[in-house]
Amino acid sequence: MIHLRTYVYIDSLQPQLAAYMASVSQGFLPVPGDAALWIEVSPGMAVHRLTDIALKATRVHLSQQVVEREFGTMVVHHRDQSDVREAGRVVLQRMGAQQSDRKTCRVTWNEIIRGMMPDHTVLINRQNRRGSMILPEQSMFILETEPAGYVIYAANQAEKAANITLIDVRAVGAYGRLTIAGREADVDEAAAAAVHAVENPSWS
């Protein structure tokens, strides 16, 4: 029995998120404007079968696959949204599942820290080498979700909503973590968009 944990469809990858995903992807690299689908299932090994189904049925490209004992994640993308939607449809059909069967996202942490101190920003920048850097005096928004994959949608919607800097997006494992930074007003707007996104994830 394969359980659907995360099912997130993104209609158009925003520039910073696409670049960040490319920095961690081991497969075909996404570019801004691509549609993408993030699926997480349990047990983890089942993701190989689902990936094979999606790739054989459509023209989508595999950008990432993470196989852990408990969870497995696959990320596919394509310029044509219809291909990405079809990939999701055939995967769900093979699982005997519906998109509504995905696990409801739970926000486990949500906080804005304003006027960051230099010591704090330097440490964050040394820890996160795949995204951009946070600068002193900027505000920082941090979001943690369970399941992890939902932070991808949160990051994309935050970038759509405001002029922010994407610092870190960790979307595999037990919990997902998103860190963004920028001017206080922009971070407030992006944070609201990110929380709304995980509370009302997309339907494809």
Image: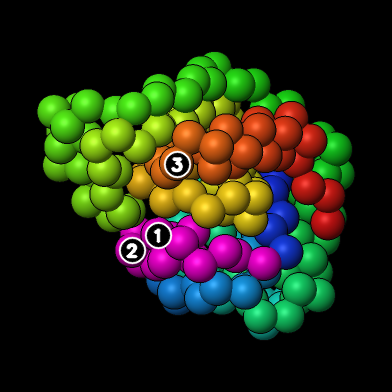
Report the amino acid beneath label 3: Arg
Image quarter hosting the N terminus:
top right
Query: Given contact means CB atoms under 8 Å apart, are the residues at marks 1 and 2 in contact?
Result: yes
Report the amino acid beneath label 1: Tyr
Helix, strand or loop status at disc 3: loop
Binning the other alpha carbons within 10 Å of mark 1 as few (below 14), some (14 to 19) or many (20 upward) gives some
Closer to viewer: mark 3 or mark 2: 3
Task: Point out residue 109 in the picture as x, y percentages from the top left corner.
Answer: 51, 18
Q: Earlier in the sequence, mark 3 or mark 2?
A: 2
Q: Residue at x 55, y 27 (%)?
A: 145
Query: Given contact means CB atoms under 8 Å apart, are the residues at marks 3 and 2 in contact?
Result: no
Q: Residue at x 15, y 37 (%)?
A: 122
Task: Point out residue 51 in the picture as x, y percentages from the top left corner.
Answer: 59, 62
Q: Residue at x 42, y 66 (%)?
A: 19
The image's mark for residue 23 is 2
- Indicate the quadrant where residue 58 lies: bottom right
Task: Point out residue 151 in the picture as x, y percentages from the top left corner.
Answer: 55, 40
Instruction: Residue 13: say if magenta.
Output: yes
- For the residues labelled 3 and 2, the Cα–Cα distance comes to 25 Å
Segment tinted magenta in the rendering: 12-26
Binning the other alpha carbons within 10 Å of mark 3 as few (below 14), some (14 to 19) or many (20 upward) gives some
Helix, strand or loop status at disc 1: helix
Report the amino acid beneath label 2: Ser
> Could you tell whether 137 is left or right of 92 in the image?
left
| Main secondary structure along the magenta-highlighted residues | helix
The answer to whether residue 47 is above or below residue 44 is below
Q: Residue at label 1?
A: 20
- For the residues labelled 1 and 3, the Cα–Cα distance comes to 21 Å
The answer to whether residue 119 is above or below residue 75 is above
Q: Residue at label 3?
A: 183
Instruction: Residue 74: say if magenta.
Output: no
